[in-house]
Amino acid sequence: MVSKELQDLLLLAKTKSSDARARLVENITDLFLTDDGRLSEHERALMSDILGKLVSQVERDIRKELSQSLASSGVELPDIAKMLANDDIEIARPLLEKSALLKDPDLIEIIRMRTDEHRMAIAMREDVSESVTNALVEYGSEDVLETLLNNHDSQLSSRAMEYLVAESRRVDRFQEPLLQRSDLPGDLAYRMYWWVSAALRKRILEEYQVDPIVFEHAVKRAASSVMVDKGEEQSAYVRAQRLVRRMAENGELSVQFLLNALRQQRVAVFVAGLAELGGVNFRTAWRIFSDKGGESFAILAKAIGVDRNQFTSIYLLVVQAREGGNAKSPGVIKDILALFDATSEANARGALQVWQRDSAYQEAIEELERVG
């Protein structure tokens, strides 16, 4: 029976009429791809090689129908699935998007050898493994990577995630999909803070937590690594850092002292004091002071224990010192205060540490200074 039915299939394959093609698809589907097919599993295994040769000879529209049937049937014909998945994208797409017959090595080979359209279909699969996503990151275009980021069933390795976060500084459309992923670590979200839009900054500060970090250790590290510039034009900043260091050693450095320094327009002393209390270097504190958005300053203020009333006074003085007296609108001040209230001190300290220790942050500063 098997021999006769195969002979019938071969005869139909050689016949060019549309009726013969329709009967060929129907017969192959009936024999191989339906649960009540007339062939046993053993017979299907024996005949899969013959079917593979047959499939390679039939026309494009027949291969497309077979691909769709195989993708939805679940019948174990992995060799045929691999053959069709390597075909033109219109034939391969159903299998690339849905078929469990394609294992990770099969998918990785297709990613390496086939087109970006094939990679796009793979990026849309459910439960994309880390090894497959690594291959997509290596070989895929920006369109493929954006699709991958929007597929929340894909598993991104830490290396792939770090790469995509770094790329998001250059490729804006990666930013929002990254921040919508539940597997984005808090420290990488805070790394993105310096190059995303104001709306995304707000999301980072409101939604992302960072691992607890011992704040005293941060202060000690800052004490040994405070940036002291030797140039003559930086002498005021050097003196300011030495002053606040002595005050800290004597237990005299406080938020109230910083508030008084700012009222006296001693900006260098104020920023040096922020750096000392916050456990960051002078350069980081200066960037936060200069950030016109104000969100990063709210984080720093919360981290060093500034209370709400002090923060309101300090923030208004910072705006005055930084922008020459141009007042912020009441709505902006209200938003900054809301952020200050919503941020925990522990999370603010963690955010500071991410910004301080992250080399990518320093690179972002330099880029901002070049373009700004």
Image (cartoon, rainbow, N blue to C red):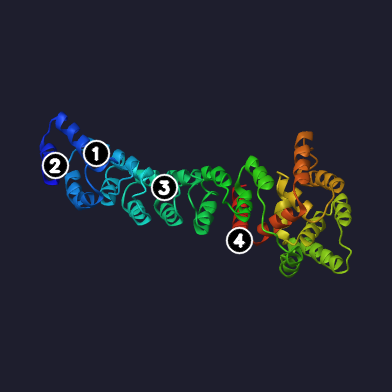
Mark 1 and mark 3 residues within 8 Å of each other at the beta carbon: no
Mark 4 or 2: the one toward you? 2
Tag 4 and tag 2, C-beta contact below 8 Å: no
Closer to us: mark 4 or mark 1? 1
Label 4 to label 1: alpha-carbon separation: 58 Å
Which badge, 3 or 4, comes first in the chain's sequence? Answer: 3
Front: mark 1 or 2: 2
- Tell whether label 2 touches label 3 (CB within 8 Å): no
Residue 93 visible, this orientation: no
Q: In this view, does 249 lie to the left or right of 195?
A: right
Judged by depth in the image, the label closer to the viewer, 3 or 2, is: 2
Q: Which of 47 and 207 is in front in this view?
A: 47
Return the residue at label 3.
141
Query: Contact (CB < 8 A) between labels 1 and 2?
Result: no
- Residue 59 vertical position relative to residue 148 in the rendered view, above or below: above
Earlier residue among tags 4 and 1: 1
Q: How far apart are marks 3 and 2 (CA)?
A: 45 Å
User: Closer to the camera, 296 or 63?
Assistant: 63
- The image shows residue 31, relative to residue 209, as above or below, that is above
Report the residue at 63% width, 56% height from top.
Answer: 187
Question: Which disc number belongs to residue 29?
Answer: 1
The residue that label 2 is drawn on is 5
Q: Which mark is residue 359?
A: 4
Tell me the amino acid under the disc marked 3: Ser
**Is any part of residue 250 visible from this angle?**
yes
